[in-house]
Amino acid sequence: MSIDFTKIPTPCYVIDELLLRNNLGLIKQVRETARVDILVAFKAFSNWGVFPIFKEYGFGASASSLNEARLAFEELGVRAHTYSPAYEEETIADILKYSSHISFNSINQLRKYSNVAIQKGVSIGLRVNPEFSDSPHDIYNPCRPGSRFGITADQFGSTLPQEVEGLHFHTLFEADSFALEKVLAVFIKKFGKLLPKLKWVNMGGGHLITKRGYDIYHLVKILIDFKNSYSVQVILEPGSAFTYQTGYLVSTVLDIVENNGIKTAILDVSFTCHMPDCLEMPYKPVILGATDEIPGKPTYRMGGISCLAGDYMGNWSFDKELKPGDKIIFDDMIHYTTVKTTMFNGVNHPSIGIWNEKSGYRLIKEFNYHDYKNRLS
Ligand SMILES: Cc1ncc(COP(=O)(O)O)c(C=O)c1O
């Protein structure tokens, strides 16, 4: 039985539990076959209302802030592997309380906080920058010249500070295993001499393991070969892969307007507030039942409910003319959405719900005026 979207009050993010479990199962299979650690990167998805499902699969967590590390501890029941470009004196003690591993972005930060991390028994790592990425989007390329992320090989010298147990790199974006293979070759060339002294290597995120066609056997082989060559624990921390293609943003057409021959369907959702990656990356999302523009078919821009002039995307064609009340269902709207949304313009936040075959739709959270008011003062 597929989701009955007519039953879902909009606007709403709807997670499909079956699709989510498929992803979790596949990633667990990679973890067990390669005998590596795979952490959920909270930056991509941290809707803790569904963590009871995640818990069944036994993943750890990767955090980028005190809030994420604390959420991992409270709601996933694990201490996080934490990395931030810099830590603050006011919060480092709490971050260490909720972390099993901490990676520092610079030698300055390592010098500043390594003693306290050692006292708390937290394993220390350094983020390195291999200066190699094949990300097609500059905004998601942490290895660009001038990047603020990680220590480059020429800054490193030949010795590892003795308190450092691990290295962390993150260079990939929605990548396949062959991209990882290329990055690893560069990483080994630049930092390989440090590997015999390490306990762990964290290969960051960007591994889109759950994308159709991803060669998981190749990934497993690379990971096993690496582990066997260097006798280190291997850690991956993908975000997107966990919730890739696991649900929708369901919206309703409120009005149709026309200007200079361009028809816009005004929706009860917003690109800037609820689908920010579409504008930031940018990319054009899939709408169920619509196609890219086909001349001769009813064709529309989708217009957001905010006042931002650029809060629209185009163009999609439909079989029939759209009218107020029609549902517009954006596909693949679970990762990097609810973690990035805003209430700009006071626009209400879409509800969050989950759907499964047995019980149908279940509302997890609704938002109201108090959520808007409580963010402000
Ligand atoms: C350090 C780090 N780890 C993990 C991730 C997760 O990456 P993805 O969601 O692309 O798998 C990111 C994403 O920006 C990151 O910066």
Image (cartoon, grey):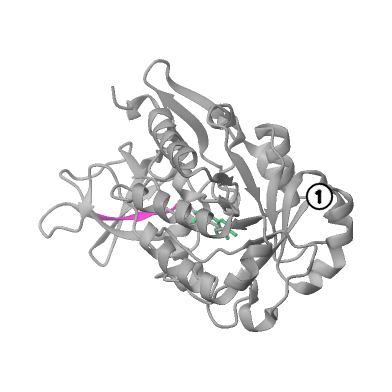
The answer to whether residue 347 is above or below residue 294 is above
The answer to whether residue 138 is above or below residue 100 is below
| Residue 109, quarter of picture | bottom right
Residues 125 and 322: in front is 125
Q: Residues within 10 Å of mark 1 (few under 14, many from 20)?
A: many
Q: Secondary structure at mark 1?
A: helix
Residue depicted at x 72% and y 51%: 101
Magenta segment main secondary structure: strand
Could you tell me residue 215's position as x and y percent?
32, 51
- Residue at the top extreme of this rendering: 358
Residue 303 included in the magenta stretch of the image = yes
Residue depicted at x 61% and y 72%: 193
**Does residue 319 appear left or right of residue 41 in this picture?**
left
The answer to whether residue 272 is above or below residue 323 is below
Q: Which quarter of the rendering shows the N terminus?
A: top left
Q: What is the magenta range?
A: 300-305
**Does residue 362 appear left or right of residue 259 in this picture?**
right
Could you tell me residue 291's position as x and y percent?
21, 51
Residues 129 and 68: in front is 129
Residue 190 included in the magenta stretch of the image = no
Which residue is identified by label 1?
A: 96
Could you tell me residue 58's position as x and y percent?
57, 32
Residues 84 and 217: in front is 217
Whether residue 242 can be seen here: yes
Q: Quadrant of ligand 1?
A: bottom right
Whether residue 10 can be seen here: no
Could you tell me residue 82's position as x and y percent?
70, 53
Q: Amino acid at mark 1?
A: Leu
